[in-house]
Image: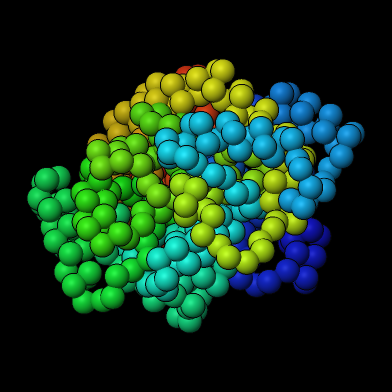
């Protein structure tokens, strides 16, 4: 056991998960690669849990952070803050929400907390609809709406949460239906749930479920839900912490695959916008954002340093069409992986969009999740020079692939080859 790992175990919680039998310390990165303290180089296909969205050590971002740090790092929301206003203006413009207001936090957890505060206050209800297999953060309230047992350490909650079907297309009671029938069945389930409760405050949903293993419904499900929700004035919160900023390739926001009935009332974001800096936030219509009747500030949300990073990162992403790159390179990568999976009985499904790809593993000849093989593939890929993630619903048996959006075709091919070798070694 190395010294840092031993020290980690002495002072940090037992439940603070680490990847790998021999955990690694990542010391630096550049582009789509990182290095550990032993000098090993890795192609990074997980980006700090979808957080290093653009590239490691992106010069435009590091320059902006350095220059801002030389002026002022922080002053809080009690003072006017030019970088915060400028980033809010940019985000409001690309949000798709009319008369949008933006509030910055330090994480996706805190962003979802804030969205729940706004929705329950606006609607005067503490009942929330959430999706099965969902994940929304690690705070007390967000754990209470997380529909994934592996990430829900307590049954206590300040909210009454009702779970509806639809976030997982290929498992559950409606899996055998075609897409239209699937949506109709999920809508019928939603109507049935609403018939048994007082009107909820909101539905919160990830367009593509992140920790749940990159699962998603057919396009249009949340548009159909939206029509039902509008009948009772129930709000729609799109959790875009993992799907935002063009990662899915086809859309800038994940909710745009479900846009027929209009945009969400609230959108939460985090992770990729800061490219590693701690930025989260909520976008909402003004009447919802302004519904609080007591003071509320953020000490660290919107600090000048993180806003400078976010501005530089968003500018780079838009000017270099990284959404288009995610669509093109991600499309090639997912087809390459599907070709491999077709030859392997232990791969149940390769799914996803853009550079957000999941590979679900099962015990060959069955439909049973295979978390041990998933863990083995994770290890073997690391030994081959590739870092990936894992997740899943009933059991952690899905590999998660989410490289920086600047990934090149050559790097995609390199990563796919390493992953193919890792998968074949277990089949």
Q: Nearer the viewer, residue 138 or 117?
A: 117
Residue 123 shows up from this direction: yes
Asked if 320 appears above or below 164 in the picture, the reply is: above
Asked if 139 appears above or below 252 in the picture, the reply is: below
Asked if 71 appears above or below 208 in the picture, the reply is: above
Residue 268 shows up from this direction: no
Scheme of image coloration: rainbow
Task: Give the residue displayed 36% in from the left and 29% down from the top.
Answer: 250
Query: Which quadrant: the N terminus?
Result: bottom right
Left or right relative to 185: residue 114:
right
Quadrant in which residue 191 is drawn:
bottom left
Q: Nearer the viewer, residue 87 or 222?
A: 87
Task: Give the residue displayed 64% in from the left and 39% down from the top.
Answer: 274
Q: Nearer the viewer, residue 74 or 372?
A: 74
Asked if 30 appears above or below 191 in the picture, the reply is: above
Q: Position of residue 25 (x, y in %)?
A: 72, 49
Task: Give the residue displayed 43% in from the left and 39% down from the top.
Answer: 97
Task: Give the residue displayed 84% in from the left and 29% down from the top.
Answer: 67
Q: Position of residue 71 (x, y in %)?
A: 88, 34
In this view, the residue farthest toward the bottom is 156
Left or right relative to 353: residue 108:
right
Q: Position of residue 396 (x, y in %)?
A: 41, 60
Q: Position of residue 317 (x, y in %)?
A: 56, 25
Q: Nearer the viewer, residue 128 or 265?
A: 265
């Amino acid at each position: 056991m190395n010294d840092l790992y031993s020290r980690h175990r002495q002072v940090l919680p037992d439940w603070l998960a680490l990847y790998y039998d021999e955990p690694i310390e990542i010391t630096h990165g550049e582009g789509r690669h990182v290095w550990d303290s032993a000098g090993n180089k890795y192609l990074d296909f997980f980006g700090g849990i979808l957080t290093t969205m653009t590239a490691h050590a992106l010069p435009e971002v590091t320059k902006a952070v350095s220059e801002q740090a030389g002026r002022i790092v922080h002053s809080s929301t009690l003072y006017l803050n030019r970088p915060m206003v400028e980033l809010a203006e940019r985000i409001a413009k690309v949000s798709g929400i009319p008369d949008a207001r933006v509030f910055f936090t330090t994480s996706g957890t805190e962003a979802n907390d804030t969205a729940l505060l706004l929705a329950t206050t606006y609607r005067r209800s503490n009942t929330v609809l959430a999706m099965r297999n969902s994940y929304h953060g690690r705070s007390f309230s967000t754990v209470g709406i997380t529909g994934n047992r592996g990430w829900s350490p307590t049954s206590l909650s300040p909210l009454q949460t009702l779970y509806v079907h639809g976030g997982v297309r290929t498992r559950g009671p409606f899996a055998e239906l075609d897409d239209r029938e699937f949506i109709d069945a999920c809508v019928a389930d939603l109507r049935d749930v609403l018939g048994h409760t007082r009107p909820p405050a909101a539905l919160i949903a990830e367009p593509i479920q992140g920790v749940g293993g990159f699962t998603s419904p057919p396009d249009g499900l949340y548009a159909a839900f939206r029509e039902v929700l509008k009948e009772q004035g129930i709000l729609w919160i799109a959790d875009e912490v993992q799907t935002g900023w063009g990662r899915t390739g086809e859309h800038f926001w994940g909710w745009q695959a479900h846009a027929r009935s209009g945009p969400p009332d609230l959108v939460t974001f985090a992770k990729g916008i800061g490219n590693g800096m701690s930025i989260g936030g909520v976008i909402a219509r003004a009447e919802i954002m302004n519904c609080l009747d007591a003071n509320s500030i953020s000490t660290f949300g919107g600090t000048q340093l993180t806003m400078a990073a976010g501005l530089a990162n968003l500018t780079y992403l838009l000017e270099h069409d990284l959404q288009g790159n995610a669509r093109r390179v991600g499309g090639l990568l997912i087809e390459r992986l599907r070709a491999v999976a077709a030859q392997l009985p232990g791969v149940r499904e390769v799914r996803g969009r853009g550079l957000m790809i999941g590979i679900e593993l099962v015990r060959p000849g069955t439909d049973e999740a295979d978390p041990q093989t998933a863990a083995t593939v994770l290890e073997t890929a690391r030994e081959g020079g590739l870092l990936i993630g894992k997740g899943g619903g009933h059991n952690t048996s899905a590999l998660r692939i989410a490289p920086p959006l600047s990934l090149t075709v050559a790097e995609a091919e390199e990563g796919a080859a390493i992953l193919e070798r890792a998968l074949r070694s277990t089949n």
